[in-house]
Amino acid sequence: QVQLVESGGGLVQPGGPLRLSCAALGSIRSISVMGWYRQAPGLQREWIGDIKRGGSPNYADSVKGRFTISRDDAKNTIYLQMNALKPEDTAVYYCNADLLLSGGAVYSYYWGRGTQVTVSS
């Protein structure tokens, strides 16, 4: 069984930073792509960015220049460093990963349960 566990969410003032982490736990053989999404109340889930194993991160225009994605393959973990946060960044943030289970034959996407980020004074 595989779990993606996000952490680091909370309340932050406008202009402040916050760092999220997401660890993939379980019997994992390999992880291809890891990414971040967010969903604000009443809106569809929005892609923030992703990063392939050994590759460079890609970002949505709405966060480019403020958010930074990185990953630690030794820990099966992806990070989201968020700077200059705005109230419109308030959302539940989710991570996902395209991974291969130990003994598996195909890659499949898994999702975390999400962590709330609230930007407010």
Image (cartoon, rainbow, N blue to C red):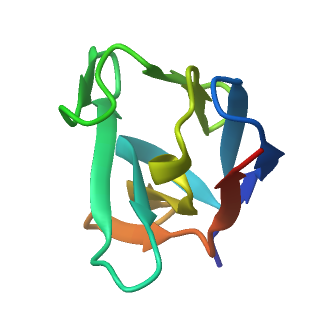
- Number of labelled discs? 0
Asked whether, in this view, residue 99 is left or right of residue 85, the answer is: left
Look at 52% across and 62% down and name the residue there. 94
Residue 17 in the image: state x and y as whole percent: 70, 24
Q: Residue at x 57, y 32 (%)?
A: 85
x and y percentages locating residue 68 in the rendered image: 46, 19
Q: Considering only vertical position in the picture, is 52 above or below 36? A: above
Residue 25, visible in the rendered structure: no
Q: Nearer the viewer, residue 106 or 83?
A: 83
In the rendered image, the vertical position of residue 68 relative to residue 5, given as above or below = above
Q: Position of residue 33 (x, y in %)?
A: 32, 42
Quadrant holding the C terminus: top right
Closer to us: 83 or 34: 83
Q: Nearer the viewer, residue 56 or 100?
A: 56
**Residue 70 appears in view:** yes
Rendered location of residue 40, percent (x, y): 45, 71
Q: Quadrant of residue 54?
A: top left
- Looking at the image, is 21 positioned above or below residue 24? above
Q: Which quarter of the figure is the N terminus placed in? A: bottom right
- Residue drawn at 47 percent across, 80 percent down: 41
